[in-house]
Amino acid sequence: MKAVIFDVKGSIAHFRRPDTTATHLTYPFITPTAVKGMVGAMIGITDFVTSDRVGIQLLHPVRTSAQQLSMLGKDAGNTFNRPTTMELLVNPAYRVYYAGDEYVDRLEDKLKQGHSVYPTYLGVAFAMTFPRLVAIEPQVERFDEDMVTTHTAVPTTLIQDLMLTETRSTYSRAGGFMKEYLGNRTFEKSISYIYEKDGGPIVFRQQSDADEDCGVFVIKGEAVCLV
């Protein structure tokens, strides 16, 4: 399969966790389904369903801020403003690895043109972003070694042993990411990640019987975890 690498960044972002109500909490970084939605917006497909894979690398540290916003709601057809507490990601930036055989060529064309059919944003409409092409990898191969060093977020199902390094690192676990979008606003399965909050490397030993839906691949000489 082929891979396209692109960067997205902004001043704020919000990827709402669906299990939060009164206070809108965010995932700590962009979700795989949000990436695919962004790709669908760029190439012009509104209900975008694909088996292409996504890898995510943090380029800026994870920082959050809680803000109370005046949100527009609806009540019996009459609009009103309601105060809503929302957790925002501050100065987010990500390197996205998008790999597969379905829509990679169309995405490459849009990124080279600097064009998007629909607006692209980081989770919410007031967090616009403009993806920037980084590189193309014509042929992606499996990473066939047991020990992996990667700068991407790592699905927990891939990890047999997490190797702690001597460098100062802060590892966190984030769960409840939606894994597969089936269309018509329906999802199936979930996935959890281990990530380093400053975007530093993660060293681990691969599971020998890891989920086939996840894997470690070599892209531009780097080990990348794709979902």
Image (cartoon, rainbow, N blue to C red):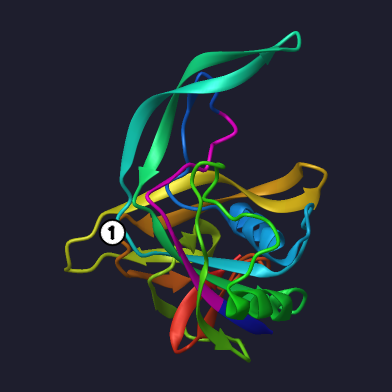
Residue 116 showing in the rendered view? yes
Name which residue lies at 35% across and 50% down: 172
In depth, the one of 220 and 76 nearer the eye is 76
In depth, the one of 46 and 157 nearer the eye is 46
Which quarter shows the C terminus? Answer: bottom right
Residue at the far right in the pictured view? 184
In depth, the one of 154 and 114 nearer the eye is 114
Q: Residue 67: percent from the left, percent from the top? A: 36, 28
Label 1's element?
loop
Q: Which quarter of the figure has residue 88?
A: top left
Name which residue lies at 71% across and 60% down: 40
Q: Residue 29: percent from the left, percent from the top? A: 45, 51
From the viewer's perspective, is 173 left or right of 131? left
Residue 159 in the image: above or below residue 66: below
Q: Which residue is identified by label 1?
A: 198
Name which residue lies at 37% across and 50% down: 11
Q: Which residues are magenta?
A: 5-19
Name which residue lies at 74% across and 47% down: 188
